[in-house]
Image (cartoon, helix red, strand yellow):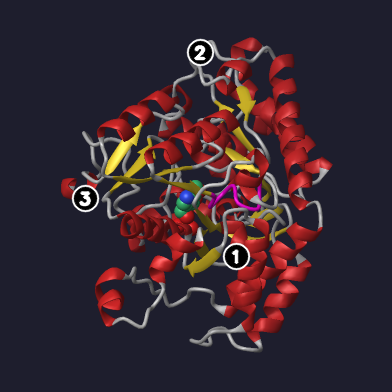
Amino acid sequence: MDLANSKLSAEDLYRQRTQTSEALSRRAREVFPSGVTHDSRFMQPHPISIDRADRSRKWDVDGNEYVDYFGGHGALILGHNHPEVTGEVREQLSRGTHYGASHELELEWAELVRSLIPCAEKVRFTGSGTEATMLAFRVVRAFSGKPKILRFVTHFHGWHDQAAFHSHESLPAGIPPALAENIVLCEPNDLEQVRQKLESQQDIAAVILEPTGASFGRVPTSGAFLKGLRELSEQYGVLLIFDEVISGFRCSPGGAQAYYGVTPDLTSLAKILAGGFPGGALVGRADVMDGMSMRDDPGWNVGGRVAHQGTFNANPISARAGLTTLKLIAEGNITEQANQKGADLREAMNEVARKQGSSWVVYGEFSGFHIFVNTQDVDISLEAIYAGRVPHTTLKQPMSLVHQTRMAFLAEGIDLISWPGGLVSAFHSEEDLEQTAEAYGRVLERFNPSRH
Ligand SMILES: Cc1ncc(COP(=O)(O)O)c(C=O)c1O
């Protein structure tokens, strides 16, 4: 950053660098609510508009280059445009994009998923992660004959009605209270509260959680908690669902369940599963998944069976991209590389903060990182966060602060996800990580100028 730029506020610098993005954003607000097509892409004063991407980098319409930690919302552990994936997809384009029929690619894709994910005895592809958890809820209700699902506050399972709220007292607009009645909410990491709910309510079909904690560890959890949940779910006869939409094929080739050695009954998958293309899956125990099977019994098929459709389920493009990506993950050390880079980046950023005497901390596990934007100088440490001593209400940062943080990083050529934080791919380079740590130092100076 040159000296002239360092005198500008982060917002002035951001506005100066992103004038074409701003013009596009004005145009977008005429056609999209809030000018965006996904809530978490919304940003004040305006989001950047991307022109192209390659490996760990992307470029906006004003020609600015960014180190990308948005990572296609977590779908891109191989970075952008991995040559094997794009080569296979190009080949597939010429063979047809939608057969409206069964095909061998979907079979190979499912067999590979089954060989990687411990609980996956059977597989059903969906169009997205949201659809996968939606299907999970229906399947467990059908299997158990019980209506309720136990979820944890802050854990994200997509945007469908039964997933998209974190308090019965303040339901978001459009979610009918009658629907919400079938969701039981617990505080994250509170095993005793789960026990009490399971003891007092016999109509709970399943417990669902993100096995790495809310938003890939923004509110961390532990292997001990997962083991405790597994034991409780067995004791009370309820099914256990891991939502591995983000952790699947990322924590390890077999996801969080292989890493922690805790096997759930069902797992929802998406993102990396489809190699950067749309797609999801519900996988799990054969007896539960077979609730979707047709039988030679019209009564069962109409009244007993779980119905499931979806125009783009296992379309050949997603199948080919997913299959190619999962092969690379299964055969190489992609997840280890990404995890190591994640650890290196967290360490390098924390080192910068320590040197500057800043109270901000960067935490996370595997290939993720979360920035605790400590403008209030809260007494916080990595140990306290990992030990679960920091309430989730403290770890969730106000939207305006997230926007300010993202903007300050964007002005430095770094694109963060809105946790705020990011996802590191196996193809981020040493240079990317160094550039990010240096940029972090300048962001800290902007937020805490008195310390320097
Ligand atoms: C854990 C988890 N579950 C479900 C979803 C929803 O997936 P999708 O955006 O594909 O609908 C996400 C997406 O970020 C997720 O991280």
Residue topped by disc 1: 274
Residue depicted at x 59% and y 17%: 448
Cβ at disc 3 under 8 Å from ligand 1 = no
Residue depicted at x 41% and y 73%: 293
Residue topped by disc 3: 179
Alpha carbons under labels 3 and 2: distance apart:
38 Å
Q: Amino acid at mark 2?
A: Val
Quarter of the image for the C terminus: give it.
Answer: top right
Q: Please give the range of residues in magenta.
A: 244-250
Q: Is residue 338 or residue 22 the one in the foreground?
A: 338
Mark 1 crowdedness (10 Å alpha carbons): few <14, some 14-19, many ≥20: many
Instruction: Tell me where residue 102 appears, x and y as whole percent.
Output: 54, 84
Q: Amino acid at mark 1?
A: Ala
Q: Is residue 245 magenta?
A: yes
Occupied quadrant, residue 405: top right
Alpha carbons under labels 3 and 1: distance apart:
31 Å
Judge whether 50 appears above or below 2 on screen: below
Alpha carbons under labels 2 and 1: distance apart:
40 Å
Q: What secondary structure prevails in the magenta region?
A: loop
Q: Is residue 327 or residue 288 the one in the foreground?
A: 288
Residue 378: which numbered mark, if any?
2
Q: Is residue 284 magenta?
A: no
Secondary structure category for the residue under label 1:
helix
Say which of marks 3 and 1 sits in front.
Answer: 3
Residue 364: which numbered mark, if any?
none
Q: Earlier in the sequence, mark 2 or mark 1?
A: 1
Mark 2 crowdedness (10 Å alpha carbons): few <14, some 14-19, many ≥20: few
Residue depicted at x 54% and y 31%: 221
92 on left or right of 166? right
Residue depicted at x 66% and y 38%: 412
Q: Earlier in the sequence, mark 3 or mark 1?
A: 3
Secondary structure category for the residue under label 3:
helix
